[in-house]
Amino acid sequence: MHTSRAKYHLGQVVRHRKHPFRGVVFDVDPEFSNTEEWYNAIPEDSRPAREQPFYHLLAENDQSFYVAYVSEQNLVADYSGRPVEHPDIPDLFGEFEDGAYPLHFQLN
């Protein structure tokens, strides 16, 4: 059995190594857990290994906001000190502080 430990944590701001976007981690899969169609859409020469953590991000680039699914090997910590402006952040997290977002839970 393969075990791995996630390098990034919920609420942490990260950026993609190759593509111009950054985001906030809101979930982590211990290994690839998306569809085969999604995986096969990635060019074979740049497909990440399945046996590593994959992160769900509230992501942004210069044009839009979206949800991204990214392998750990393609992420780096973002130390810019700038908040991410994704409109769904307040649903999951508190105010940006010290370079990250604290978890925020609403009680019904």
Image (cartoon, grey):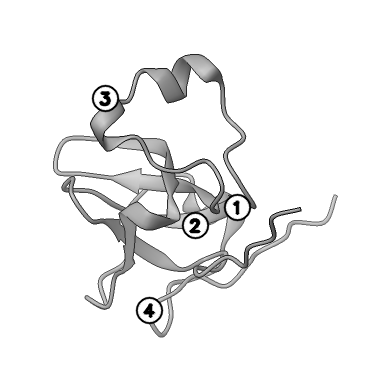
Q: Are marks 3 and 4 in contact (CB under 8 Å)?
A: no
| Residue hosting label 1 | 28
Secondary structure state at the residue bearing disc 3: loop
| Residue hosting label 2 | 25
At a point 37% along the width and 79% down the height, the residue shown is: 99
Mark 2: amino acid: Val
Q: Is residue 84 visible?
A: no
Mark 1: amino acid: Val
Nearer the viewer's eye, disc 1 or disc 2?
Answer: 1
33 lies left or right of 85:
right
Q: Tell me which label, 3 or 1, sits earlier in the chain.
A: 1
| Residue hosting label 4 | 99
**Residue that extends furthest to the bottom in the rendered view of this protein:** 98
Alpha-carbon neighbours of circle 1 within 10 Å: few (<14), some, or many (≥20)?
many
Q: Is residue 54 above or below residue 96?
A: above
Relative depth, front residue between 48 and 84: 48
Nearer the viewer's eye, disc 4 or disc 1?
Answer: 1
Q: Are marks 1 and 2 in contact (CB under 8 Å)?
A: yes
Q: Is residue 99 visible?
A: yes
At a point 43% along the width and 56% down the height, the residue shown is: 72
> x%, y% of residue 23?
36, 54
Alpha-carbon neighbours of circle 4 within 10 Å: few (<14), some, or many (≥20)?
some
Q: Are marks 3 and 1 in contact (CB under 8 Å)?
A: no
5 lies left or right of 85:
right
- Give the CA separation, mark 1 to mark 2: 8 Å
52 lies left or right of 15:
right
Nearer the viewer's eye, disc 2 or disc 4?
Answer: 2
Relative depth, front residue between 48 and 20: 48
> x%, y% of residue 100?
44, 74
Q: Tell me which label, 3 or 4, sits earlier in the chain.
A: 3
